[in-house]
């Protein structure tokens, strides 16, 4: 039966059948009963001459089933009536109602989502007659328009774009409903896309993708940190080796200058490079022996048994350098 012609008791009985079948939820029934126009009776028994109009409702007076006029809030006298045969009343709420519409659709990247749209609507004060007599099921009409708009917008967007452009979808729904529902005496205050819920498997996959992405970023950052640590350690070792080499070079230069001054002091004799190299090798030879003796964990080391053998080592090094610098060796 049509909601526009049923009484509140009949509507409850009708919805009770759907509760049993699991077709209509209690929230949807409350929305339907709030928006549907209803048959009303007068405030006196057996007659509809007088009626009390609540502040939050619009009352329409019918004479033998034909619309006559609207009543203002308060106690009103509608005319003479006998047992409700002459005068009848129809009412519709003047409050702002919110309808929750759920739309199942698919995005551009083939992800099925459920969009929840909250539509806030009320009856236009100047078009109460159209709201009462033109439309029988406000919820079904709004549900159709919302579904049409959402299913025409979301398939052109990817899942990420759908979340980013929820305001654009809301504006499209509101513009469409404002134009279409205005013909039936209803004004749309706001249409909000409150939620976009992808399929549970898609949500799990997206969470796994984000998890792996975070793990990859963490691994990259850890590797970058290890790389920086190794590079800095190598740079520090290189700087230390450079400074150590410079220190050793200055040390040897000072040793050579000291040996030259101590040997040639008071004489006019000048030491040759060969003599200075031999003195330096001898000095390093004794320093090596001292270091080996000072180390308690030193292993067995085979060295020439006398210091005079250092001159032989120096001769071998000098001959090797001279042979390496010979023209024939350079060509080879």
Image: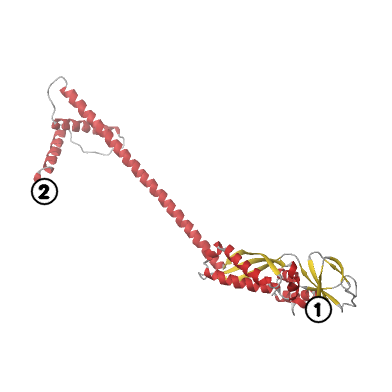
Query: Quadrant of residue 189 in the image?
Result: bottom right
Callout 2: helix, strand or loop? helix
Tell how many labels. Answer: 2
Query: Quadrant of residue 152 in the image?
Result: bottom right
* 268, 108: nearer the viewer: 108
Across and down, in percent, residue 51 comes to: 86, 70
Residue 57 shows up from this direction: yes
Residue 306 shows up from this direction: no
Quarter occupied by the N terminus:
bottom right
Across and down, in percent, residue 280 comes to: 19, 31
Q: Is residue 29 left or right of residue 221?
A: right
* 260, 38: nearer the viewer: 38
Q: Is residue 273 left or right of residue 29?
A: left
Callout 1: helix, strand or loop? strand
The residue beneath circle 2 is: 331
At x 41%, y 50%, the residue is: 224
- Of tags 2 and 1, the one toward the viewer is 1
* 258, 284: nearer the viewer: 258
What is the spatial separation of the Cα atoms under label 2 and label 1, in whole angstroms? Answer: 124 Å
Query: Quadrant of residue 14 in the image?
Result: bottom right
Task: Name the residue at the top extreme.
Answer: 266
Q: Which mark is residue 66?
A: 1
Whether 196 is drawn above or below 323: the answer is below
Across and down, in percent, residue 171 comes to: 60, 65
């Amino acid at each position: 039966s049509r909601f526009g012609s049923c009484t509140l008791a009949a509507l409850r009985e009708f919805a009770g059948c759907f509760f049993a079948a699991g077709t209509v939820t209690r929230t949807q029934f409350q929305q339907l009963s709030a928006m549907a126009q209803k048959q009303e009776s007068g405030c006196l028994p057996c007659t509809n001459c007088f009626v009390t109009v609540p502040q939050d409702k619009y009352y329409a007076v019918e004479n033998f089933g034909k619309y006559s006029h609207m009543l203002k809030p308060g106690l009103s006298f509608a005319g003479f009536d006998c047992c409700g045969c002459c005068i009848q009343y129809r009412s519709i709420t003047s409050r702002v109602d919110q309808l929750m519409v759920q739309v199942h659709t698919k995005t551009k990247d083939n992800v099925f989502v459920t969009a929840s749209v909250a539509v806030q609507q009320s009856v236009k004060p100047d078009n109460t007659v159209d709201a009462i007599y033109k439309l029988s099921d406000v919820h079904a009409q709004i549900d159709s328009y919302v579904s049409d708009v959402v299913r025409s917008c979301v398939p052109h967007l990817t899942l990420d774009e759908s979340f980013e452009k929820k305001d654009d979808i809301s504006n499209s729904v509101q513009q469409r409903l404002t134009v279409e529902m205005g013909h039936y005496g209803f004004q749309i205050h706001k249409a909000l896309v409150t939620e976009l819920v992808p399929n549970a498997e898609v949500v799990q996959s997206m969470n796994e993708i984000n998890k792996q992405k975070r793990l990859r970023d963490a691994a990259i950052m850890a590797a970058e940190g290890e790389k920086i640590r190794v590079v800095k350690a190598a740079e520090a070792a290189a700087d230390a080796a450079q400074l150590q080499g410079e220190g050793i070079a200055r040390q040897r230069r000072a040793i050579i200058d000291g040996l030259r001054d101590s040997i040639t002091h008071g004489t006019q004799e000048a030491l040759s490079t060969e003599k200075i190299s031999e003195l330096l090798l001898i000095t390093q030879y004794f320093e090596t022996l001292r270091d080996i003796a000072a180390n308690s964990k030193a292993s067995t080391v085979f060295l020439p048994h006398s210091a005079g053998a250092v001159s032989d080592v120096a001769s071998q090094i000098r001959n090797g350098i001279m042979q390496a610098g010979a023209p024939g060796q350079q060509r080879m």
